[in-house]
Amino acid sequence: MELKAILNRESFQRMSADMEAYDEKREMVIKQSRDILKASKQAIFAMHRGNMEEASDKLEVADQVIQALAPVILEEATLRNGAFSSAMEEYAEAQCFRHFLTAGTLVSLEELNFVDRDEYLGGVVDFTGEVTRYAIVQATKRDVERVEACRAMVDAISGELIQFSFRNSPLRKKYDSLKYNLKKLENTLYELSLVAPHKAFTLPSEDEPTEPTFTSAEST
């Protein structure tokens, strides 16, 4: 006499196989997301060195990996969370920086390859940090016009994001850093206005970002 099955073993076997397949996809996404992240960081570094051609090459590499991963992410939406999303945020940041340096404007979400809303917003806020670093270098060259363009960009972004309700999301902390970047740019412009034309511009102190660190024209 056959014993009645008390469970469906085939169902459990299918679930186990599905989980194995998912884990394999996840590992692949994590590994290739590192390539997107690395290429995007290298592109930003190249742009700070003034090498736009190398930056474009690195972003093209990132684009190719994104295109390869897109079908997998579309099939398994949960695979977007974590490594891939972080990489896409860095990618958005790099694209924002390149567009600013070449066109003087902010690239829109709709113009970016496979970037979602939160990744874009995170990338935009991080981009203000790159703009601030770029502005400081321009300030050492006494290029006031470029520093003003940087401040205008960060101010415009701040003006738009102030309408958002980030609550306690990761974007909340990022937005706080944007306000710091804007203040730093405003201080830089103010301090530039105090430095005599013939004097060298000194980098602001990181320890006291809101305090003037320059010698005014009146003291020379």
Image: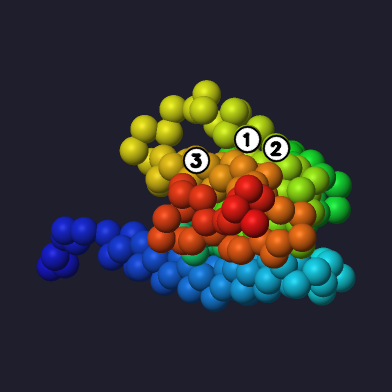
- In the rendered view, tell whether residue 46 sits above or below residue 212: below
Q: Nearer the viewer, residue 22 or 87?
A: 87
Whole-number angstrom distance, CA of label 2 to CA of label 3: 13 Å
Q: Residue at x 75, y 72 (%)?
A: 49
Res. 16 image quadrant: bottom left
Query: Which residue is found at the position 80% from the left and 46% from the top?
Result: 145
Quick one: SS at disc 1?
Answer: helix
State left or right for residue 40 relative to residue 73: right
Q: CA distance from mark 1 to mark 2?
A: 5 Å
Q: Which mark is residue 179?
A: 3
Q: With 211 as the anchor, is 204 left or right in this view?
A: right
Q: Amino acid at mark 3?
A: Lys
| Nearer to the camera, 160 or 150 | 150
Could you tell me residue 172's position as x and y percent? Answer: 41, 40
Question: Which one is in front, 134 or 193?
Answer: 193
| Residue bearing the label numbered 2 | 152
Q: Are marks 1 and 2 in contact (CB under 8 Å)?
A: yes
Q: Are marks 2 and 3 in contact (CB under 8 Å)?
A: no
Q: Residues within 10 Å of mark 3 (few under 14, many from 20)?
A: some
Residue 148: x, y in percent?
Answer: 73, 42
Label for residue 155?
1
Helix, strand or loop for disc 3: helix
**Is residue 120 in sight in this rendering?**
no
